[in-house]
Image (cartoon, grey):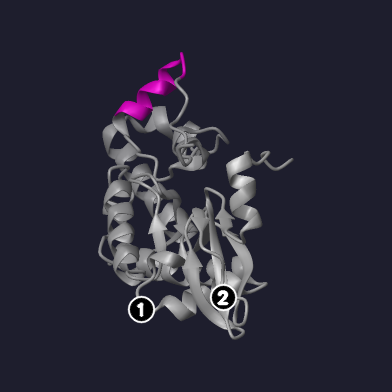
Amino acid sequence: MFAEKLTPYQYLRQKKGEIQIMPGELGVVTQDGRFGRFLEPGWHQPLKRWNEQLVMCFPIISRTVETGEKMMAADGHTFTANISVRYTFNPSRADEHHLNEMAAIAMSRQTERLLREKLTRAVSYGLRNQINLYTSSELMQGQIYKQLENGVRCYLLRAFAGQGILMDGSDSIIIKTLQPSPELMEEIRYRKMAELTTALPEGYWLGMLDQPDEVITHTIKSWPNPPAARETTRANFQEVIPFKPVSNGNSRQHAN
């Protein structure tokens, strides 16, 4: 993409040695070969020729990190959780205790990898601690997602305070899936079968247990989507055995 044509006034300032930093970028200036300071977007006075140099313009853009792993609930059951976090890295917002570290990341050739590793560790730790606060039955309710996301957001805000790593809005953290372990799914299936045997006549449910699309199997395999309605009397089983999905699925995405 071609650079915007300079006005006569801007051309004059450029000839005088002044530096223009474009919107959405951050100028990185070294002094005697080491990091010196950042330049915000706009025009700046000429650098000191004997020891200062503009080495790069760092883009201030929105980045996304996604991670997933097995995590344990408060009652010992395991869940496979997948989470997506959108953030902005602006090293000029770092405090004096983190400024050199964040500047080194911005100036590195491995910036994306370093940021990804840093965020992934913190996000996984924060989500693991949140999931450990709830039992498996609580985690299988759709309402729990917002609580988990808010908990992770609060942890990340504390963990990255003063580091120039900023969360982008209220929808910057999304738990995409929260899948119970096969053992827990099997336990739920047996529990639902027990409910069937007590709620309905034996002759009505017994012949359905071996069917591949029997309501219990269909319900479990249909996560994150709720069971499809049926026109036959088999649809009534879903009213007897309510089963809540536990996954946000792919429908939850970051807002543009």
Which residue range is magenta in the image?
Answer: 230-239
The kind of secondary structure the magenta stretch mainly shows is helix
In the image, which disc is placed on residue 174? none
Asked if disc 1 and disc 2 are in contact, CB closer than 8 Å, the reply is: no
Classify 196 as above or below 74: above
Residue 116 percent location from the top left of the image: 55, 66
Residue 13 percent location from the top left of the image: 59, 52
Question: Considering depth in this image, is 117 or 95 the residue closer to the camera?
Answer: 95
Quarter-of-image position of residue 198 = top left
Q: Is residue 237 magenta?
A: yes
Residue at 26 percent across and 51 percent down: it is 147
How dense is the environment of label 2, judged by Cα within 10 Å: few (below 14), some, or many (20 and up)? Answer: few
The quarter of the picture where the N terminus appears is top right
Question: Considering depth in this image, is 226 or 11 the residue closer to the camera?
Answer: 11
Q: Given this view, does label 1 or label 2 mark the residue nearer the observer? A: 2
Q: Amino acid at mark 1?
A: Glu
Residue 7 percent location from the top left of the image: 62, 39
Residue labelled with disc 2: 48
Residue 68 in view (yes/no) = yes
Residue 61 in view (yes/no) = no
Q: Amino acid at mark 2?
A: Lys
Residue at 54 percent across and 32 percent down: it is 213
In the image, which disc is placed on residue 96? 1
| In the image: residue 144, left or right of residue 230 | left
Q: Earlier in the sequence, mark 1 or mark 2?
A: 2
